[in-house]
Image: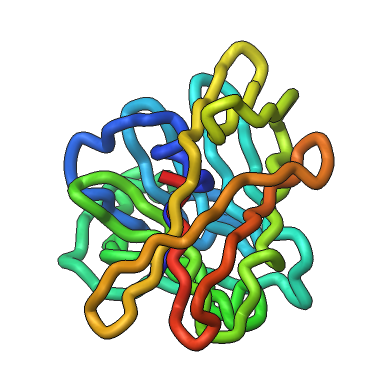
């Protein structure tokens, strides 16, 4: 039950992590407002209160969750082995144990909807988990840092950030009902110059809905 990432950005960039994505808890190796981070050769992804931040090729794209009643704090799940790393501190010889997690989750980022980021086939995926009765239309993503967003003829999106273009394919959606996978119609919609939402067709409101921006 999920909603994969634009957001999330590595998929937005179509990039490879080069291994299983590892979510690090910030224990002093980054700015204080960063709760978790993922680092790869070509980008860094940060999880903060009420937003995610993608740094790539010298650019910054802030993925903000509009319409929140309050700003949710992400939490790590599935503790992995500790990674010992040198970090900047007043003591140049200081080392800290960096806590690693298999996933990062915002509980109830919208009423009845969670956001979970995890590894899927070695790549980052970030999925909205829409519980029964929770309308997916309340999900609104503001892309602060995007210069232009356009709907493509194939149903996808093109996001322009300075001299970089991010291409996002047409989203897909489905439900799992008694072990059967049922496809649900879904499309992107732009509410203004940089805010994205999802419009769905008919579906069973008593079963979780999975929307995947691919």
The spot of residue 92 in percent (x, y) is: 36, 43
In the orientation shown, which residue stands out farthest toward the front? 202
Q: Does residue 31 appear to the left or right of 149 in the view shown?
A: left
Residue positioned most to the right: 192
Going by the image, does 156 lie left or right of 104?
right
| Front residue (pair 177, 105) | 177
Q: Quadrant of the rendered structure where residue 105 is?
A: bottom left
Q: Which residue, as the protein is rendered here, is positioned at the far top?
A: 163
Q: Nearer the viewer, residue 151 or 41?
A: 151
Q: Quadrant of the C terminus?
A: top left
Q: How is the image coloured?
A: rainbow
**Does residue 130 sit above or below 33 in this rendering?**
below
- The residue positioned 47% from the left and 40% from the top of the image is 9
- How many numbered dots are placed on residues in this image? 0
Residue displayed at 65% across by 31% down:
151
Q: Is residue 108 above or below residue 22?
A: below
Residue 122, percent from left and from top? 20, 46
Q: Residue at x 43, y 66 (%)?
A: 210
Q: Position of residue 23 (x, y in %)?
A: 34, 57
Residue 67 as seen in the image, left or right of residue 57: right
Image quadrant where one finds the N terminus: bottom left
Q: Residue 62 appears at what percent x and percent y?
A: 65, 43
Residue 3 visible? The answer is no
Q: Is residue 179 visible?
A: yes
Residue 119 figure quarter: bottom left
Q: Quadrant location of residue 149? A: top right
- Rendered residue at 50%/20% (across/down): 57
């Amino acid at each position: 039950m999920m909603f994969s990432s634009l957001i999330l950005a590595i998929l937005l960039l179509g990039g490879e992590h080069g291994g299983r994505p590892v979510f690090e808890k910030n224990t002093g190796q980054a700015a204080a407002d960063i709760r978790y981070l993922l680092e790869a050769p070509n980008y860094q992804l940060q999880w903060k209160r009420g937003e995610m931040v993608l740094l790539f090729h010298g650019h910054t794209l802030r993925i903000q969750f509009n319409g929140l009643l309050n700003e949710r704090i992400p939490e790590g799940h599935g503790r992995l082995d500790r990674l010992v790393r040198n970090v900047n501190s007043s003591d140049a010889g200081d080392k800290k144990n960096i806590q690693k997690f298999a996933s990062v989750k915002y509980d109830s980022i919208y009423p009845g909807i969670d956001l979970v980021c995890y590894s899927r086939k070695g790549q980052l995926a970030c999925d909205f988990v829409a519980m029964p009765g929770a309308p997916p239309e309340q999900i609104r993503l503001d892309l602060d840092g995007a210069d232009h967003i356009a709907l493509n003829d194939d149903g996808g999106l093109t996001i322009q950030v300075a001299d970089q273009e991010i291409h996002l394919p047409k989203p897909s959606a489905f439900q799992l009902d008694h072990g059967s996978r049922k496809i649900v119609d879904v499309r992107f919609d732009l509410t203004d110059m940089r805010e994205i939402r999802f419009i769905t067709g008919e579906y069973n409101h008593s079963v979780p809905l999975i929307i995947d921006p691919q």
